[in-house]
Image (cartoon, grey):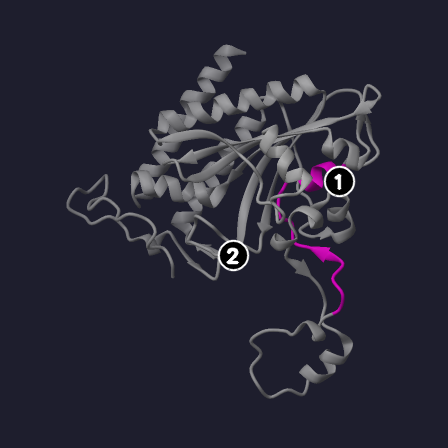
Amino acid sequence: MKNNELKPAPNTTRNNPTKPAPSIETLFSTSGGMATFTDRGHAIIQQLEVIFLDWASFIPATNIRYPSLIPIADLDRLNYFRNFPHLALCACAISESACADFSKRQDDLLRLDHRQLQSAAFCLPPAACYNVYLSMRGQHLSATRCVTTVANCFRNEDHYQGLRRLRAFTLREIVFVGRDEDIKTYLRKYRAIALEFLGDLGLTIEVKHASDPFFDKASTAARATRIFPTKEELLFNGTLAIASLNYHRRFFGERCGITIEGQPAHTGCIGFGVERWVYALIEHFGTDTEVILDRLQASHSAVMSHQSASQ
């Protein structure tokens, strides 16, 4: 278990000052870059999901759930293996010859050798938004389209650290495809909403330009993102990105043949790393789930009221 990256929780609960606060283990545990949540921990995730879906309704965005695998050919169309081959996790079947051997084996199986596997045709999704662009291939849009989606995502990182960095994690994204000005307007809108909400919660947040973790940091794509920043991260306590705002210009429109008004569509998205939000909330409020849920609801109500009044 690697939950000790969190600070100790307050010594008492909200409703009973003499009762010790619950331990971290009553909310979640992590091992091997993967997290397991108890019912109390999952309640926080469920509340965050309600909040993010309510935010998506401001546009409104269509809520779509995509498959849990992405064809390698589709990821290659998006230059994923040129830019991020080190992060990819593939899914493949066991070879027929190995299947025959396994049926007779006596020893315990700890891992599979690559020679026992068939060639991989699919990858586990590294982000939620890719399927949005791929699903719109070849489409000619008459207006900017907005989609929200959630996905279990997977990345082969060089290290893992509790909820801060996971091999398997949850991304809720709100994605925009269409006119340049619409994309920029939506990104500004959701930047303001997220900052208002986090400010009302009392979390310390910094906004900083960032770049994606390119394998070749000297590549043309990596250099371009440093010269013309297209990504902003919302950093909890100045170190942990719990949300990111991404403006891709025409890249996905060109790669997927998505057009609007006769030109390649622009795209953008805001993504929320759900487990990292849980980490930030526990770090800030402690392990009393009732306190966290109450604060989430109060801040959400304040933001919703403000947004309704401004529309």
Q: Nearer the viewer, mark 2 or mark 1?
A: 2
Q: Which mark is residue 126?
A: none
Which residue has dot 2 on it?
Answer: 158
Residue type beneath disc 2: Asp
Q: Residue at x 49, y 42 (%)?
A: 274
Q: Residue at x 82, y 19 (%)?
A: 261
Instruction: Give the SS element for disc 2.
Output: loop
Q: Residue at x 62, y 49 (%)?
A: 215
Residue type beneath disc 1: Leu
* 24 relative to 282, above or below: below
Image side of residue 23 versus residue 61, left or right: left
**Cβ atoms under marks 2 and 1 closer than 8 Å:** no
Region of the chain picked out in magenta, as a range: 118-135
Q: Is residue 63 magenta?
A: no
Q: Which mark is residue 134?
A: 1
Q: Which of the two residues, 133 or 36, is positioned nearer the viewer here?
A: 133
Instruction: Give the SS element for disc 1.
Output: helix
Q: Residue at x 34, y 43 (%)?
A: 282
Residue 92, picture quadrant: bottom right
Q: Which of the two residues, 266 or 65, is positioned nearer the viewer here?
A: 266
* 137 relative to 308, above or below: below
